Amino acid sequence: MYSMTTSAVPAPRGPVTRKDVARFAGVSTAVVSYVVNGGPKKVAPATEAKVQDAIRRLGYRPNAAARALKLGSSETIGLVIPDNSNPFFSLLAHAVEDAAAELGYALVLTNSDGNLGKELRNLRNLAARQVDGVVLSSVLMEPALPELESAEIPVVLLNHSADAPGFSSVGVDLVAGAKAAVEHLIGHGHTNIALAMGTNTGNYYDGREEGWLQALAEAGLPEGPIVRTPFTREGGYAAGKRLLAGASRPTAIFATSDLQAVGILRALHEAGLSIPQDIALASFDGSAEAEYSWPPLTTVKQPAKAMAEAAVSALIGAHRGQDSEHLIFPAELQIRQSCGCP
């Protein structure tokens, strides 16, 4: 019945305001506010239906800036990752976005390209936007964040393997995951296992190297050759070529990222080698790229969804405001053909 009344009200010219919606629906602007904001006062179902119909017909969009000012919250969080073109970080970002959306928050995604200067610029921009919090995959083990601290914007470190005093952080057990992969290669009879180690801006010691070392030492094997290149396809390709050119060609390689392993695969194929018959290969991350390479890669899978949910919960969810906590998740070895298994 109300549609006949509201249709007689002419549609406004220019941007639609809350007052226009109130006129169209035949209610007060306060009632429109209650419907848009879900309170604080309840609105009768029939009245709410009239307001929603007016919003739909007029194409009204609430002013996000005004809403943020009134609520004292932008209902937005920031995410800084090294590179969302990396399948693992793309997966991680998607999981963070989903977890934030479940709590009614939007996500602003930025890339640091593994560069400290760009990371800091991104953080300054997020602080200027007055986001409610930041999930940060930093290039440093203990980042300094003066802009966010002065703005009282909380931060949770994600994909962070070591405890960082003063921060809540979420990561994966790099040492145990890498050790499991190398032990699996040893189980195939390999005694000369190389490490393709990714480089990082902070030059901090990476647990994946420690896992490789522990597995070799416990098996009574000597350290194989090490090459250090970026966590990229290009870095892996360069690592593969250098390992093949070395004095003692390894029979197996552990790569610290799936992207590196994909690059290594190209180098091995170009050299006319068979994988795993000539050289076996295992990697770290558990991205879709590992599953669809040829041969499919045996890889250590990081639980991206669980890690993202834990980080968002610590930032804006059930664990918000609690004492800083360092959460480490176990990784899972996914066995495919590149290691020598059927």
Image: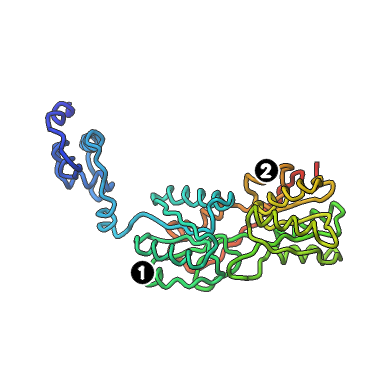
Label 2, on which residue? 291
Left or right: 131, with 324 as reference point: left
User: For this rendering, which residue is in front, 326 or 258?
Assistant: 258
Left or right: 91, with 44 as reference point: right
Q: In this picture, is 187 found above or below 45?
A: below
Label 1, on which residue? 151
Whichever of callouts 1 and 2 sits on the residue coming sooner in the sequence is: 1
Residue 316 occupies quadrant = bottom left
Q: For the residue carrying disc 1, how many other residues have a C-alpha within 10 Å: few (<14), some (14-19), or many (20+)?
A: few
User: Which residue is pictured at 78% across the width and 59% down the height?
Assistant: 243
Q: For the residue carrying disc 2, how many other residues have a C-alpha within 10 Å: few (<14), some (14-19), or many (20+)?
A: some
Image quarter of the N terminus: top left
Q: Position of residue 273 (x, y in %)?
A: 81, 47
User: Which residue is pictured at 75% across the width and 61% down the height?
Assistant: 195
User: For this rendering, which residue is in front, 247 or 138?
Assistant: 247
Q: Position of residue 328 (x, y in %)?
A: 60, 61
